[in-house]
Image: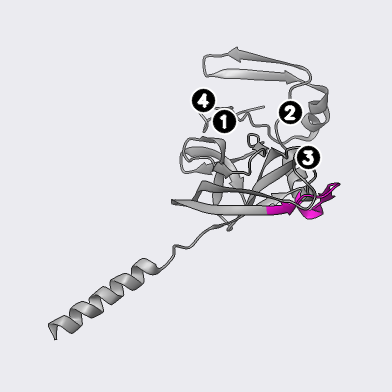
């Protein structure tokens, strides 16, 4: 009788260990190309579709969190640039202010194909990707992803992927065309920016937020306009 009970117990433990944890982000690699050509440069992206009420983080996560990371595995001669981060959202959690994304994140980067690639070849971009996804609790998730494209004499566009990458790039920070000043005050600091591209937006904006590029500030503090 004792041996039967022990075996049953081991079976229950083994079954519990085999159960995969639920994931809250559906990851994929996308590219604006359906086919590449020798010497091509194009944008690819890590795409995370998130469960409702969950979020992932910007390159500066704010008061807590970690940004997504990539360890690329690329064929000889293929190179990759840095992520081009789209504008984040300010996400309040209790007394913390985090910077990140809800619903979906498309995180583009530029790839270069060597001129020695030949039509008829295939190019596979791959990597291991890690991200921290949070709701009331935070869960580390990871995935090994790959995307294979044929090499042809001329490029072919993947229109849906190109549209998604273009929408992300459109919100990435752009250099200021005008001038900016920063003034320290007794309570913190004030930023003023003069730029023709901001003039129309400023007329209708209900709020404006400064996202620090890594500098330490009181992220939770009000930012009156």
Closer to the camera in the image, 177 or 185: 177
Label located before the other in sequence (1 or 2)? 2
Q: CA distance from mark 3 to mark 1?
A: 46 Å
Q: Left or right: 98 with respect to 172?
A: left
Label located before the other in sequence (2 or 4)? 2
Q: CA distance from mark 2 to mark 4?
A: 22 Å
Kindly identify which residue carries mark 3. 40
Closer to the camera in the image, 154 or 27: 154
Chain part drawn in magenta = 148-161
Kindly identify which residue carries mark 2. 174
Residue 146: image x %, image y %? 62, 53
Secondary element under disc 1, as helix, strand or loop, is loop
Label located before the other in sequence (4 or 1)? 4
Query: Residue at the spot x=71%, y=35% of the render?
Result: 172
Residue 124: image x %, image y %? 66, 50
Count neighbours of disc 1 (C-alpha within 10 A) and say few if under 14, some if 14 to 19, many if 20 or more. Answer: few
Residue 35: image x %, image y %? 79, 51
């Amino acid at each position: 009788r004792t041996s039967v009970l022990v075996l049953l117990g081991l079976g229950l433990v083994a079954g519990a260990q085999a159960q995969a944890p639920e994931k809250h982000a559906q990851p994929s690699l996308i590219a604006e190309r359906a086919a590449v050509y020798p010497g091509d440069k194009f944008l690819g992206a890590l795409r995370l579709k998130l469960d409702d009420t969950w979020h992932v983080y910007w390159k500066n996560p704010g008061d807590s969190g970690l940004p997504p990371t990539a360890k690329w595995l690329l064929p000889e001669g293929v190179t990759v640039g840095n992520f081009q981060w789209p504008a984040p959202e300010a996400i309040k959690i209790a007394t913390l202010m985090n910077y990140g994304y809800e619903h979906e994140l498309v995180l583009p980067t530029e790839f270069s194909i060597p001129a020695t690639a030949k039509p008829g070849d295939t190019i596979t971009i791959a990597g291991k990707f890690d991200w921290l996804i949070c709701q009331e609790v935070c869960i580390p998730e990871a995935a090994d992803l790959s995307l294979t494209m044929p090499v042809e004499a001329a490029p072919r566009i993947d229109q849906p992927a190109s549209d998604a990458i273009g929408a992300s790039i459109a919100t990435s920070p752009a250099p200021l065309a005008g001038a900016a000043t920063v003034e320290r005050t007794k309570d913190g600091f004030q930023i003023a920016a003069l730029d023709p591209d901001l003039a129309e937006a400023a007329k209708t904006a209900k709020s404006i937020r400064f996202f620090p590029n890594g500098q330490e500030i009181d992220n939770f503090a009000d930012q009156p306009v």
